[in-house]
Image: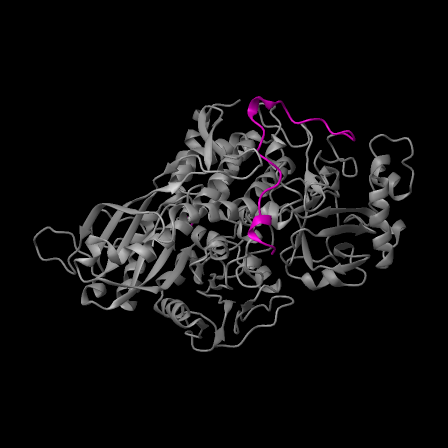
Amino acid sequence: MRSTARLAPLALATLSALGACTETAADAPRDAAVVTDAPAHDVGDLGSLIVDSGPLPDDDAGAAATLPEGDCDPIDPSLCALPWPSNLYLRRDASRRTGYSLTFGATSLPANGSRDPIDPRGLLRFDGYGLGSPIMTSFPGLDLAAMATEEHMDRSLAADAAALLYEVRGNTLQRIPYFVELDSQEREVARKILFLRPAVILKENTRYVVAFRNLRTTAGAAIAPSPAFARLRDRMTTGDAALAPRQARFDEVFTLLEGAGVARSSLTLAWDFHTASSESLHGRLLAMRDDALTRVGPSGPRLTVDNVTSFLPMRDGSGRPYDENIALEISGTFEVPHYLRPRRLGSLQGWEMNYDPSGRPVANGTRQPRFWIRIPHSALRGEAHGLVMYGHGLLGSAEEVRAGYNGRIANANNLIFFASNLTGMSEEDLSGVFASLRDVSYFTSVGERLHQGMVEWVLLARAVREQLGGLTEVATRNIRINPAELYYSGISQGGIFGGTFMAVSPDVTRGHLGVPGNNYFTLLHRSRDFTGYLEGLRRNYASTAEQAVALAFVQLLWDGTDPVSYLRHIHEEPFPGNAPHEVLIAPAKGDFEVAVFTNEITARSGLGVALMQNYDRERTPFGITQAPYPRRGSGVVLYDFGNAWPAPGNIPPAEVGANPHGLPRAREWHQRQMVTFFRTGEIVDTCGGDGCRPD
């Protein structure tokens, strides 16, 4: 195993990069405690929504078992775990909601530089693949000329499309739009993995079929199926210990395809997979949330104040801190149930979920996260103020709530901002993230902590709403709180996980998601922020194909909190006990850090999130009808600061011009749009009817 010390130069370089996108000194509040502007890279009853797979086995419980048919899927011989997501790893399990348990063999997943295969046991809790799972396979020399690419998604539904993605509905197949791309991270053409990316968010507990037919190379030669797939297609598996047990399932797939007009003989490769149920994806987090809310009571966890700083509205020569917008900062701790237990990550301290014998998350004592509350000068006039919970940027800190633009919004609009670290993806978690680059098995700890972090956010929102007005530090200053106004605003990572929070919170009904996206597997390669982390991954996983599978494993662990799993439950299918919630999604065209098109996927998915009128002058996203202003409900408003759309491919955008990632939050017209949405539920056009552009 490689020493974490060898990652230190990378860690320093990455942390340096994390400071690249910051608020200017002139814009920041002027006090000694100020931080920079924001992220650098910046259904049944509740009882049924409980994880039913039991706890993750302890490290000393033995290695994962070898699968009866072999640990590798031979229908794509290019890499053991391909094609992804393979039906080989869906083991029949009548006790699970989908009828499966996700079960990889001991050597199914790539090994790192120390020859340690990724430990798959953390996936046993899933009863299918996550909604963010990439679809990956390999066809050396494949010609994409006539296929559906990012710029031509309409081709994915053509009658003669070479690649096909279907949702299985009974005995019939429903076409699903998608686009394909070859791995831009790989320079050698023959080694490029093919990604097929759904153009809509997949559904829970649903069977899908993937098929490729009549494929050819760029030289015009027909691409032959692998020997294993040819034997399955041609019913030649009798006596084959690896393939014969799978013949019946593949025959089902071929019959479904033939019913859709796809000739069996035309297939170069085809398979099916099943997505995880809501119980599997959401059950643990919802069980934790409900248990925690019961434990802390209707007023939430007690807020314990340990620091109060007052600010003058202007410099007076006394040396006292001053801030044009903020009058008072209150910070302290709040005690919450802790649902994790320690687990070693090599030489580091990690965490895993604490389960009872039935597999339900159970509290393991308590912990005390910190909170920050920023009260504007306007609150000293005695007028009632609403509340805004702020979500910080990539692996950052709740202290980013101190950003100058938040102060201006607060003081101009009678709002009080508050924040806490997102446990699992804050500066406290950097060591776990870096350890995961050495052995991605360790990402289990990050995924578990994110569940804890989301519960802490839910509890803090409840506590601030119920207790802030009664705190001595507030009540003695004649500061009044309007508890009916409780909103969320997150930027970058805070915008991303804001989608999850808005689905899970029972109290916050309107949220602003600034420069967000969803599905980390799709986002990572397309972000400049991931470059340093990717270098660490490359040091430990040799090939780009192995790196892709490693990240697909990570995405499965992320799927328990990634918004790709939760966006459906904000408005369209609220979790039990929640009313429909609404979100204003505000991406920036040409963002260097977050892939904007993932928000278009959200709008295309029929989740009650509209793409707002005048979206873009250069392109019209495929398959989406734009909604007129004003709109009461959720929507996506694109902000255009003159940047070009990134070139297609899973690489970061060319950094031409200024990075627009940090711009919408600081613009008055966007702030006005956000506050109007908070208070009225309407998305209004504050950009003059021609799209949100600086001209």
Asked which quadrant contains residue 162, the reply is bottom right
Relative to 127, does residue 316 appear above or below in the rendering?
Answer: below
- Residue 576 visible to an observer of this rendering: yes
Prevailing secondary structure class for the magenta stretch in the rendered image: loop
Q: In this view, does 618 lie to the left or right of 691?
A: right
| Relative image position of residue 616 (x, y in whole percent) | 53, 69
Locate residue 27, reporting x and y percent: 27, 57
Q: In which quarter of the image is residue 87?
A: top right
The quarter of the picture where residue 136 lies is: top right
Segment colored magenta: 41-70
From this viewpoint, is residue 536 visible? Answer: no
Q: Of all residues shown, which one is farthest toward the left?
A: 318
Counting labels gives 0
Examine the structure image and report whether residue 414 is included in the region drawn in magenta. Answer: no
Foreground of the two, 415 or 623: 415
Q: In this view, does 685 lie to the left or right of 121?
A: left
* Side (left or right) of 244 relative to 373: right
The coloring applied to the image is one colour
Q: Does the magenta stretch include residue 58?
A: yes
Q: Along the line of sight, which residue is nearer the eye, 525 or 469? A: 469
Residue 70 against residue 247 in the figure, above or below: above
Residue 423 position, x and y percent, is: 42, 42
Where residue 339 appears, as percent x and y from the top left, is 46, 38
Screen quadrant of the C terminus: bottom left
